[in-house]
Structure formats: structure tokens, C-alpha cells
Image (cartoon, helix red, strand yellow):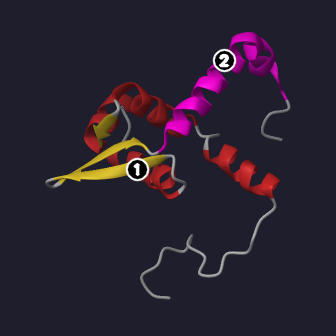
Amino acid sequence: MAGLPAVIELNPRPLPDAEVVARMFRTLTDATHLRIVELLIDEDQLHQIDIVRRLRASQGRVSEHLASLTCCDFVATRSEGRKTLYRVADERVRSLFSAAHGFLGSNEAAIANCRRVGR
């Protein structure tokens, strides 16, 4: 269908729960994605240019990251005049990040030294 991004499936096939959870976590394997979500958790909402400045990244790259996070419902948008503001889409995202930081509290050294990640 013309006009739809290639990532949109018109008739998506049902996936096993484990695959959907794996996709959720794969979305967060990018450090920039994590930094953006953490900025939004800390600041409640930000304009894209504020995210660009804080990350010291190009606007194009930040736009790609925001599109991915928005597509996967980690981030939501709100229009304010001609500006688009980004915010965490769901309070459960905050809980997920809080749980991840709690897990790191007692496992950070093991995770930092794990050589099997990404294989």
C-alpha cells in the first residue's frame, strides 16, 4: 500500500509471547534509546531539539531514535502549536526502568563483565 512505511505490516502474524518480549527488549538494546527514555523520565517531556542538545547528537539520528521509540510505544508525542513534545508513553515504562536499575544494584559487575551479551 502506497504511503505506509515498510515496517508496518498490513496483516501482522501473531507472535509467541517470548518473541514479543524479546522485541521489546531489543528496542532497548540501543544505548541512545535508553538515554532518550531516561531523559524523558527525568524531564517529563522535551522538544526534539532539547534531546539533540543534551545527547550532543545529530537531529537526524535523534529523529530516527524517537521514531523507533514512538513506533514501539515507549514514547508518545504531544503537539504544542508547531512544536512536538516527547514524553514517556506509559507509566509502566518508568517502572521497567526502575526495575532495571534495581536489578543492576546487585548485578552490575556481572553484567559489565559478561562476554556473552550480543552473541
Local packing at callout 2 (Cα closer than 10 Å; few below 14, some 14-19, many 20+) is few
> Are the two marked residues, 1 and 2, in contact with CB atoms closer than 8 angstroms?
no
Q: Image check: 28 left or right of 41?
A: right
Q: Is residue 35 above or below residue 62?
A: above
**Camera-side residue of 18 and 67:** 18
Q: Say which mark, if any, is on residue 41.
A: none
Q: Which residue is mark 2?
A: 102
Q: Label 2: state its secondary structure.
A: helix
Residue at 81 percent of width and 52 percent of height? 18
Image quadrant occupied by the C terminus:
top right
Residue 58 is a magenta residue: no
Cα distance between the residues tagged 1 and 2: 25 Å
Quadrant position of residue 7: bottom right
Q: Amino acid at mark 1?
A: Ala
Q: Amino acid at mark 2?
A: Gly
Query: Which residue range is magenta in the image?
Result: 90-115
Percent of width and height locating residue 102: 66, 17
Percent of width and height locating residue 25: 68, 43
Local packing at callout 1 (Cα closer than 10 Å; few below 14, some 14-19, many 20+) is some
Q: Image check: 38 left or right of 26?
A: left
Q: Image check: 69 left or right of 22?
A: left
Residue at 30 percent of width and 37 percent of height? 46
**How many numbered marks does the figure carry?**
2
Q: Which residue is mark 1?
A: 76
- Residue at the far bottom: name it: 1
